Amino acid sequence: MTIDNSPPALEANGIVKRFGGALAVDDVSILVAPGEIHAVVGENGAGKSTLMRVLAGILIPDEGIVSVNGVPLTGGAKSALDAGIALVHQELSLIPEMTVAENILLGSTPTSFGFIRAAELRATAAAALDEIGVSVDLDESISRLSVSLRQFVEIARAVARKPRVLILDEPTATLTPAETDYLLAMLQRLAAKGMAVIYISHRIPEVFRICKVVTILRDGQVVDVTRIEDTTPGAVIENMVGKELKQDLDSRRDATPGEVVLSARGIRAHNVNGVDLDVRSGEIVGLGGLVGAGRTELVRAIIGADARTGGSALITVDGAPRYITSYQVAVRSGIGYVPEERRTDGLALSMTVADNIALPNRRELSVFGVQLRKKTTAFVTALATAVALKPPQIERNVGEYSGGNQQKVAIAKWLGRKPQFIVLDEPTRGVDVGAKAEIHRLVRELADTGAAVLVVSSDLPELLELSDVIHVIRDGRIMGTLSGAEADEKSVMSLASGEKMVGA
Amino acid sequence: MTTQSIETIGEVGIKQNKFNLLVWISERGVFVFTALLILFGVFFVNGFASVINITDVFYRAAPIGIVAVGMTFVVISANYLDLSVVAQVATAAVILIGVSNDYGLPLAFAVALFVAVLYGVVNGVAVGVFKANAVIVTLSTTFIGLGILRWLSGGSIFFGPEDGPVRAFGQAKIGSVPLSAIVLILVTAILWFVLTRTNFGFVVRSFGSNKEATRLSGVNTPLVVIGAFVITAISAMLAGFVLAAFSNTAVSTMSDGYDFQALAAIIIGGTSVFGGKGSVLRTLLGVIFVSVLTNILVLSSIGFGLQQMAIGALIVVAVSVDALARKVTKK
């Protein structure tokens, strides 16, 4: 895909990267010419970020070679940096307590005998900011800057190293439309000076605005490489989601939703910008969207796990409505919450399966605060069997189990409470196929017994398979609502990536 | 897929079963070392295996033991420790003797209990609600508490009447076991029950193991922290009573070093400073170990300076073993 005959700025050949048994990147090759803005797109989990970390030398590939200007890279991150590859991370990696200038030169601070050459530091930092056309006080500490300004400082930090290849991973995720315009124009300027830019994004419109070539990844493999003028946004999205994953409509439940159990109005919180949401008894509502769209923040704000800045949530159990004023009220009112991060938020890994399952049920399993041990054992054993924990050894520490079994425990702890409303955030992330099917069965059973179920999932086939209704979230808002029957990968991705807006 | 899950378990299981000296020491060490130490004392140390000496060990172990057993709750809740036990013990001792001299025992008990609960709530609110660092909070409340005590007491020493009930309690023995040691065993038994058999103990352990997962299970976590500090404070109050009764005197400096000695017993007992893991029975064993060790050093005419050094070194070793063992089990 080189534009002329000069050597490619960056060439990767046959890159393979495994994590444990899982192939994250599967035989990927990519060629980027100097001055080219090259998009890498794909769904959540397609392998984009892993590939970029390989290119930047942060991860060592299991197979394949990365070369810059025809010279293969030998070592890790340091050698990639020296060769001229700079990565702007998705997660900000600046040090909040240090100044803008110090952060820009972090890791390449000019020193003499261990003393910082302050004047040179400031001059270099100023030049880098000048290069990207952003004016910010060099001595301001990062913690006082807005998130978007931090993003620009992060880019200045990469540019200060005068890279041949600049890699940006979702740089516009935290930016406003005006800031995004500015960033895109800036990238075009840098490219015009001969810098190669690899632009990773979920946002198809941005890709079509500035990129020359687009590489589409799916399940760790390159499914298409094409010049931007030879394709359309629709075709790109179709390639991202893949046609073979078409919905198996037979697996859909025959849902007959009942009364509204959970009613949220005007929910506002960090990254959530005014959402109305109803979930009915017996209904599975799916929340689709890209990573960072605000789905987790939304569900946590609804149930009070994190503070809201506005709006209210009403839960109706047995005809009695109750406002969710705190997370504890929510739990007492009969909600269950299976968080996204089971290892840090969902389970106490160093405690036993029995302890983890008993924790939210402790009041029912005690008399005057004294635990009823036999009752607890029977209760826990029944739930461990219900979720098909393998092996069902309830006195083992949860941390010793596989991810899928851990997730079953994280669900089981709520099942005994017969939740009226249950939220499952990424219920099958990092779970093997067998456990995934069992978890799907559990979610359906919950809805069949009358629970209102809210599922957040970045796994599109899962979302489509489980949900009766899908709300697609972007920028903390519902961008569209699709009924289970009309939703497919393409319609969800179109809404999620901002390619178009329908419904609502 | 079934087989895959079982393999995962099996694999991790084997890893866990593999012998690791650090894990072994952190989990079983205190039992063996205490037994060895006692055997050493019996066979090699003159005067160790006498009724008078054992009674003396009991007397000295009791107040520190009561503090340590209570403070185990704070340590298990992953809030490091409660340094203010130093002020709490001295305050309770001075109240017991000072107030009972003039106003009688019931009022002394009531005032002491009020002050203890106040300590627990202040520490607990600062740490549990405001999420302040426990070490700094309790270091500060030590200053506040000792400051108030010295201001109100004028730094004077309080003596109980020779024929008073405090004195009688302090001298009482069942066989050759002093009553204070019985109190230690009772407190340990009660707190063992609270920690292992009640919902409160359950959430303390769970909170120490994973704060966020415990909160997201619907537990009122600030209350858990407050509860742990209140239990510590009430234990410290009982320790203050026992200490005052032993000598029938009370002074604001009488409990200096209790914070560190209690922590030593807890850590040597094998309760993890990372929280979640530990027991009051282990702490009791830790108390016995430290008391016997100190006693042996004293009987061997080893000076106070070297004793201090030995305990300090032991703690560095114990904490390091805990941290290293944790790294190993975390796979």
Image: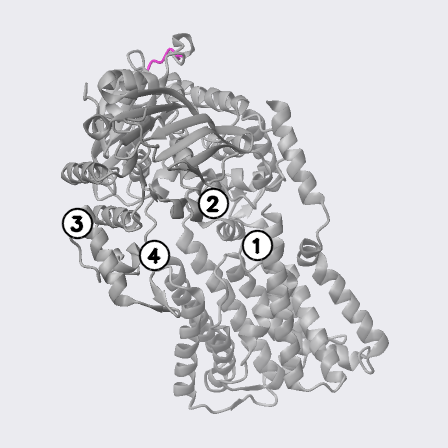
According to the image, label 4 marks what residue? A106
Which amino acid does the dot numbered 1 rest on? Leu
Tags 1 and 3 on a common chain = no
Which one is in front in this view, the residue at disc 1 or the one at disc 2?
2
Q: Chain of mark 2?
A: A
Please report the residue visible at 19 percent of the width from the left and 28 percent of the height from the top. A209
Quarter of the image that includes the C terminus of chain B = top right
* Image-quadrant location for residue A145: bottom left
Residue A69 to residue A433: above or below: below
Label 1 to label 3: alpha-carbon separation: 58 Å
Which amino acid does the dot numbered 3 rest on? Val
Element at label 2: loop
Which amino acid does the dot numbered 4 rest on? Leu
Please report the residue visible at 42 percent of the width from the left and 18 percent of the height from the top. A448
Residue A85 to residue B72: above or below: above
Which one is in front in this view, the residue at disc 2 or the one at disc 4?
2
According to the image, label 1 marks what residue? B195
Residue A96 in view (yes/no): no
State the residue in front, A101 or A460. A101
Label 1 to label 2: alpha-carbon separation: 49 Å
Label at residue A134: 3
Tags 1 and 2 on a common chain = no
Label 2 to label 4: alpha-carbon separation: 18 Å
